[in-house]
Structure formats: C-alpha cells, structure tokens
Image: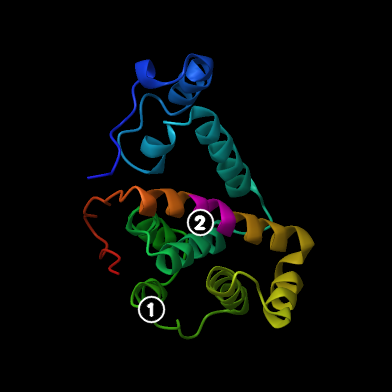
C-alpha cells in the first residue's frame, strides 16, 4: 500500500482544481494505480510530466522497441517494480527479446544486443549509475541516433526516473502481472 492515499478533488487546493479536473479528464477518471495516482496530489506536476512523457513517446528519433528497452533499464536501475510491471510485456511486444528482458531483470548484461540496443542499455545504465555518461557511450548514442535521438534518450531516462523516484518514495506496489516475472530488489 502506498504511503499516501488517493487524492480527491476536495483535497486539492482551490487554485489547482482546474488542473486536477483537466488531468482527470485526460486520464478518463481518477487513476487508481500507478504513478499518476500519486502525482494527482500535485495536478499541475501530473499534467506537465504526462505531457512530457507523451511528447517523448511520440518522438520518432527512438523506435518504440528502444523506448521500451530504456524503460526496462530505468526500472531495473531504479528498482521500480511498477515501471517493470507496466513495460516488461510491452517491451516484448515491441521486439525486445525475452532473454534480454530476463537478463535486465536479473541484473545480468544482456548478450547479443544489436548496436542500437547496446547503445541504449549502456547509456541508460551509465546515466543512472554514474549520473553522467562516458564519452564512448555518448558518441555511440550520437552516432546511432543523432543529436535529437540522444536528447530524446536522455530525457526519456529522466522522465521515467522521476516517475520511479515518486513510486519508490511513496512505496507504490506493483500488481502481479499475469505473464511477466516481477522485478525483485
């Protein structure tokens, strides 16, 4: 159970009620699970973070497969079970091999990644572990994805890290997934 309960409209500051209403409408009602069940306590933040997330997800400089690989890598590095829950199956559907998903979950280096996949995994791990990326990883990402793709990669990692920080801080549990193994600490 999360450390804070779901927020209701009545609990939101008067000046934030329009943002709360707009956010709830955009989500087709109050989110009862996931990071936005927490972020709804700050509806302006929820709206802005969701706008960023959607913008980055629509960015063509990184394929959906690579985006999902980023999310799995963020989930593992941040120890965020909910992001893992939400993205393990979609990653496979987007073309990430099952053995790669398993390796990331089990904290092993995935084998036989194509150069794009390797660049994404290395970049994500370095940024989250070291708070910076090496020249080699930066140059590999830029060579593969260009300047825009590298910027997209950096910001996608940051966006999902913000979500993970919130879920980890407020101890948001992930539901059991019907087909995927859970992320363990």
Between 84 and 114, which is closer to the camera in this rendering? Answer: 84
Please name the residue shown 37% across and 54% down the image.
168
Residue that extends furthest to the right in the rendered view of this protein: 147
Does 119 sit above or below residue 43?
below
Decide: few, some or many residues near mark 2? Use Cα within 10 Å; few <14, some 14-19, many ≥20.
Answer: many
Which span of residues is magenta-colored? 157-162
Q: Which mark is residue 1?
A: none
Q: x, y percentage for residue 124?
A: 56, 69
Q: Is residue 18 magenta?
A: no
Q: Residue at x 38, y 51 (%)?
A: 169
Name which quarter of the figure residue 180 lies in: bottom left
Q: Are marks 1 and 2 in contact (CB under 8 Å)?
A: no
Q: Is residue 161 magenta?
A: yes
Left or right of 185 in this view: 56: right
Q: Which residue is mark 1?
A: 107
| Image quadrant containing the N terminus | top left
User: How many other residues sit within 10 Å of disc 1, few (<14), some (14-19) or many (≥20)?
Assistant: few
Quadrant where the image shows the C terminus: bottom left
* Residue 16 x/y as whole percent: 51, 20
Disc ID at residue 161: 2
In this orientation, which residue lies closer to the viewer: 93 or 73?
Answer: 73
126 lies above or below 39:
below
- Taking the spot 39% from the left edge, 55% from the top edge, the residue there is 83
Image location (x, y in percent) of residue 167: 38, 50
In the figure, is residue 60 to the left or right of 170? right
In the figure, residue 146 lies in which quadrant?
bottom right
């Amino acid at each position: 159970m999360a450390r804070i309960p779901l927020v209701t409209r009545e609990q939101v500051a008067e000046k934030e009620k329009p943002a709360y209403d707009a956010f709830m409408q955009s989500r087709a009602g109050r989110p009862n699970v996931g990071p936005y069940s927490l972020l709804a306590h700050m509806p302006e933040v929820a709206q802005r973070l969701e706008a960023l997330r959607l913008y980055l997800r629509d960015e063509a400089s990184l394929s959906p497969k690579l985006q999902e690989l980023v999310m799995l890598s963020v989930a593992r590095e941040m120890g965020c079970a909910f992001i893992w829950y939400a993205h393990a199956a979609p990653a496979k559907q987007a073309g990430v091999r099952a053995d790669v998903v398993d390796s990331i979950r089990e904290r092993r280096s995935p084998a036989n990644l194509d150069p794009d996949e390797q660049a994404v995994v290395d970049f994500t791990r370095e940024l989250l572990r070291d708070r910076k990326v090496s020249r080699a990883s930066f140059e590999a990402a830029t060579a593969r994805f260009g300047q825009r793709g590298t910027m997209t990669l950096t910001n996608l990692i940051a966006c999902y890290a913000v979500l993970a920080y919130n879920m980890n801080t407020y101890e948001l549990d992930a539901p059991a997934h019907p087909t995927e193994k859970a992320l363990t600490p």
